[in-house]
Amino acid sequence: MAEGTKVVRASVKTRLRRGLRFLRTRVRELRMIGKALASTKHPILVHIIPMRQCNLACTYCNEFDDFSKPVPLDEMKKRLDVLADMGTSIITISGGEPVMHPELDEVIAHIRRRGMIAGLITNGFYLNRERIERLNDAGLEHLQISIDNVVPDDVSKKSLKTLDGRLEMLSQWAVFQVNINSVLGSGVKDPEDALKIAQRAVELGFTSTVGIIHDNNGQLKPLGPHEQDIFEEVMELGKRSFSRFNEFQHNVARGKEHEWRCRSGSRYLYICEDGLVHWCSQQRGYPGIPLAEYTPEMRHREYFTEKFCAARCTVSCVQQVGILDNWRGPQNLKPMQMEPPAPQPQLVPAPQPQLVQIGQGRGDS
């Protein structure tokens, strides 16, 4: 334990509530797996963005701005209803910083009302006891915070030093499951930080995972020998996490191409703040179709479409979804030709749509 930190203990009532929600969530996750094995016709996991704005400006991040407005609640509910009608199992809310959305609690509650598992990815800066209790009451089941370093620097303020008090509050009051994700790879000044963060997470009763920063094309870059040793230590600490069941992160750490069938656009969807469907956060722009117009036939086609970026992908959540279908459905289709926009009266021709490969991201979903 780092000097000056402490371990807090939740009340008996909170521990009972936490245990009950954990059991209920596990039952629903087992049902989700059974449903996914029985049918390939529904999304398993969807990341949805209720707002792109963020209170931070981490230099590696490509998923935020400092000006956009939150998606109105009615529109969010419509999108969630479409996803529920598709048979989606899990919705993870991401951003930007989704806790900045003024009606986030109702978004989470609507996910639960429609029978889907509710998750949240946040930087943690807006968490306090009152906010945690509201997330409890909304029915949140999973929360993830990524912490980049032990002490804040010019790259990231998401440090153990600035967030440890928030983590203690989560340990004391959260009923939902909490995962802390640390990072390794290019741009990380001190690889030892990842291990310290993971140790603190486990000490507080959370699960721990490690993400690997990829290159500026969103593709893998191998870790050095010392970083690989730390990676293995962190993975061992995180043995309660589902990540222990696959070799994807180990291949990423070694810079080794991974053979798998990416089902983005079908079993995994990324819905941006504009309500468009994308492969994932690191390949935004395709198919770029409004969610309300995204048909079962389109999902079926993407299920069988080979993804050119799959072998060197670092987006672990997409790969974890792919595990359930790697044994079936060979992919022999190529991405569809994107339609140009309708002609508009203008002096300068409209730009042609293209797949936007986003760089300097991370492999932690």
Image (cartoon, rainbow, N blue to C red):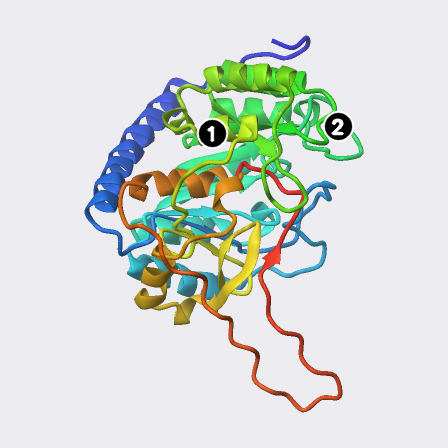
Asked if the residues shown at circle 1 and circle 2 are in contact, with their CB atoms under 8 angstroms apart, the answer is no
Question: Looking at this rendering, what residue extends furthest in the bottom direction?
Answer: 345
Q: Count neighbours of disc 2 (C-alpha within 10 A) and say few if under 14, some if 14 to 19, many if 20 or more.
A: some
Q: Nearer the viewer, residue 61 or 27?
A: 61
The disc at residue 152 is 2
**In the rendered image, the vertical position of residue 233 relative to residue 358, given as above or below:** above
Task: Say whether disc 1 or disc 2 marks the residue closer to the N-terminus.
Answer: 2
| Res. 128 visible in picture | no
Secondary element type, mark 1: strand
Q: CA distance from mark 1 to mark 2?
A: 22 Å
Q: Residue at x 39, y 21 (%)?
A: 240
Query: Is residue 65 shown left or right of residue 234?
Result: right
Horizontal relation, residue 163 to residue 252: left or right: right
Quadrant of the image occupied by residue 332: bottom left
Report the amino acid beneath label 2.
Pro
- Taking the spot 43% from the left edge, 40% from the top edge, the residue there is 319
Residue found at the far left of this picture = 38
Rendered view: 340 above or below 362:
below
Please state the horizontal and vertical placement of residue 79, each as a whole percent of the image. 42, 63
- Badge 1 is on which residue? 178
Residue 136 locus on image (x, y percent) = 43, 37
Q: Is residue 268 left or right of residue 351?
A: left
Name the residue: 51% across, 71% down: 338
> Dividing the picture into quarters, in which one does residue 327 lie?
top left
Mark 1 closeness class: few <14, some 14–19, many ≥20 residues within 10 Å: many
Q: Is residue 244 left or right of residue 39?
A: right
Q: Amino acid at mark 1?
A: Val
